[in-house]
């Protein structure tokens, strides 16, 4: 017995040939094909734009922070004391790309034109600097010791230009406000106005010093007078003086105590002073300096202090494709008691809720395009069945079952849908490639955060959507194919006479 399904497909193939479509239904078939192609092109373009927009905005938000931040769970003491072994362990977790410390403090910018509240963040060469280089409008990121980078919005608000100097008041630590004069080395603009208004960038070492996370000693000298000053201790620290003896070792000296001393700057004289204080949680925080004679006067150098071991937290960057919440769970399990984690989704929930709602727009577009394609194909298939009534009557008269006759038109509809999907994909991917290469469609960054329409083709997602759309369109063609069942052979053949 012949394979009736194969026979139905062969007949549908012959009907789809150009020689067989030279009839009044041919324009209808073309219109249906174009309609399906336009729908598929819109699906490709819409999904690519939404995914590109979501990725670009997420990268902007992550660029100002990270995928996961490790923070202190003590809201009264927001610093963490860095642990190299822990940072190494976190870097080795599955899905973790990099781990870096970060330094932030609230501050106030002041120029002759006004003031502006900001969050000052330390510039990190591995992360923040690479991110900002993409968005620099003027100047550069060479901060030196007194350089600062502002957003274009902040610079315009304070009427500052590259090279101008302005005051920064950093707020934090036991010493309250720490003012310092900075030079504007460059301006940036990401288009993410909420963040551009908020963040400025300074040398990380200055934020460490200003934060008062540990003890910091400074020395004032004038002639024989030496005065020690300490910052960051909850109360006045205890100073421990040691003098280098003739054998080169350090030994305690009882001749000098406290924060002030009168010392003759004799050649070869050398002291080491250690200040021991306590932070707000009564933890010991030391700092040390070396006092020596240079060019007949007292000079000093810092030997290292506890403030250098502290940071606002750690930034954990996740590998592309890794599941954020799985990585966050691993990071949290590896942390000591008193530390916590925050994901970028928790830090900017309103932003990511809005980005998630864009998926609903895509789903609506896909649904509408599939519906329009089904309506177009239903109309076209009914016209094809109407035109082929004599053929249907002849096939039934020759003994072909109704189901096989239905399959003839079903497979013909599937061929038309497939042709529309092919041309739609070519057109859609072509437009996406053109936009990605040239950026010819621009946006207003103040309204859309970006200056050009971003595109990103998620191949797995797109193939999945198209398979479902194709299956939905094809299955719906079974309904109009039922119209062939109502054709009676005698009436159809009589009409053909």
Image (tube, rainbow, N blue to C red):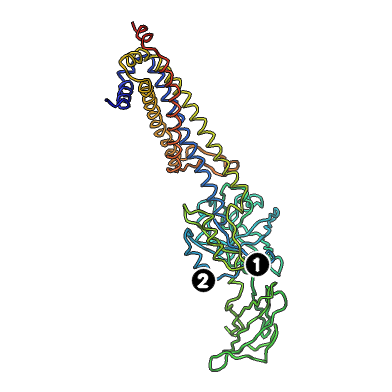
Closer to the chain start, of discs 1 and 2, is 2
Q: Residue drawn at (59%, 87%), measured in percent from left and top? A: 270
Q: Residue furthest front?
A: 1
* Whether residue 197 is situated above or below residue 171 in the rendered picture: above
Indicate the quadrant containing the N terminus: top left, top right, bottom left or bottom right. top left
* Whether residue 230 is situated above or below residue 373 in the rendered picture: below
Q: Residue furthest left?
A: 1
Q: In front: 497, or 111?
A: 497
Q: Residue drawn at (54%, 62%), measured in percent from left and top? A: 331
Q: Residue furthest bottom?
A: 246
Indicate the quadrant containing the C terminus: top left, top right, bottom left or bottom right. top left
Q: Residue drawn at (59%, 82%), measured in percent from left and top? A: 290
Among the 4 quarters of the image, the one containing residue 252: bottom right
* Whether residue 239 is situated above or below residue 196 in the rendered picture: below
Q: Position of residue 259 (x, y in %)?
A: 70, 82
Q: Secondary structure at mark 2?
A: helix
Q: Which residue was labeled with disc 1?
A: 211
Among the 4 quarters of the image, the one containing residue 241: bottom right
Residue 249 falls left or right of residue 238: left
Q: Nearer the viewer, mark 1 or mark 2?
A: 2
Residue 174 falls left or right of residue 451: right
Q: Marks 1 and 2, Cα distance to the nearest angstrom?
A: 24 Å
Q: Position of residue 237 (x, y in %)?
A: 69, 79
Q: Residue drawn at (57%, 44%), measured in percent from left and top? A: 355
Among the 4 quarters of the image, the one containing residue 285: bottom right
Q: Which residue was labeled with disc 2?
A: 85
């Amino acid at each position: 017995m012949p394979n009736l399904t194969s026979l139905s497909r062969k007949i549908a193939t012959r009907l789809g040939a150009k020689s067989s479509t030279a009839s009044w239904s041919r324009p209808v078939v073309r219109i249906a094909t174009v309609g399906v192609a336009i729908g598929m092109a819109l699906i490709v373009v819409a999904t690519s734009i939404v995914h590109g927009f979501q990725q670009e905005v997420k990268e902007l938000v992550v660029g100002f922070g990270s995928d996961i931040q490790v923070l202190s769970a003590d809201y009264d003491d927001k610093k963490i004391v860095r642990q190299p072994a822990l940072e190494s362990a976190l870097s080795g977790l599955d899905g973790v790309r990099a781990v870096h410390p970060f330094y932030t403090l609230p501050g106030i910018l002041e120029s002759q034109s006004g003031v502006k509240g900001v969050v000052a963040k330390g510039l990190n060469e591995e992360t923040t600097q690479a991110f900002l280089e993409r968005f620099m409008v003027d100047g550069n990121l060479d901060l030196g010791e007194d350089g600062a980078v502002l957003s274009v919005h902040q610079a315009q608000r304070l009427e500052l230009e590259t090279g101008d100097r302005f005051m920064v008041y950093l707020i934090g630590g036991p010493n309250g406000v720490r003012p310092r004069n900075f030079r504007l080395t460059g301006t940036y603009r990401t288009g993410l106005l909420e963040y551009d208004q908020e963040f400025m960038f300074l040398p990380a070492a200055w934020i460490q010093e200003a934060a008062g996370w540990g003890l910091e000693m400074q020395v004032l000298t004038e002639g024989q007078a030496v005065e020690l000053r300490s910052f960051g201790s909850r109360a006045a620290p205890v100073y421990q003086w040691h003098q280098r003896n003739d054998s080169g070792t350090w030994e305690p000296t009882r001749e000098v105590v406290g924060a002030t001393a009168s010392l003759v700057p004799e050649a070869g004289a050398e002291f080491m002073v250690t200040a021991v204080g306590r932070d707000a949680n009564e933890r010991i925080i030391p700092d040390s300096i070396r006092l020596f004679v240079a060019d007949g006067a007292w000079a000093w150098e810092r030997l290292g202090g506890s403030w250098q071991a502290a940071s606002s937290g750690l930034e954990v960057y996740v590998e592309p494709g890794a599941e954020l919440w799985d990585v966050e769970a691993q990071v949290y399990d590896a942390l000591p008691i008193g530390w916590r984690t925050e994901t970028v989704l928790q830090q900017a929930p309103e932003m990511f809720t809005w980005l998630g709602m864009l998926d609903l727009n895509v789903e609506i577009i896909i649904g509408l395009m599939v519906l329009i394609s089904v309506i177009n194909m239903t109309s076209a298939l009914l016209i094809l069945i109407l035109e082929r009534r004599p053929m249907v009557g002849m096939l039934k008269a020759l003994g072909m079952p109704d189901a096989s006759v239905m399959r003839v038109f079903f497979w013909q509809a599937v061929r038309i849908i497939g042709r529309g999907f092919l041309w739609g994909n070519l057109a859609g991917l072509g437009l996406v490639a053109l936009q990605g290469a040239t950026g010819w469609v621009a946006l207003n960054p103040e309204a859309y955060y970006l200056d050009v329409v971003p595109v990103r083709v998620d191949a797995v997602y797109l193939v999945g959507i198209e398979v479902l759309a194709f299956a939905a369109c094809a299955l719906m063609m079974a309904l109009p194919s039922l119209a062939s069942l109502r054709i009676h052979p005698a009436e159809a053949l009589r009409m053909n006479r």
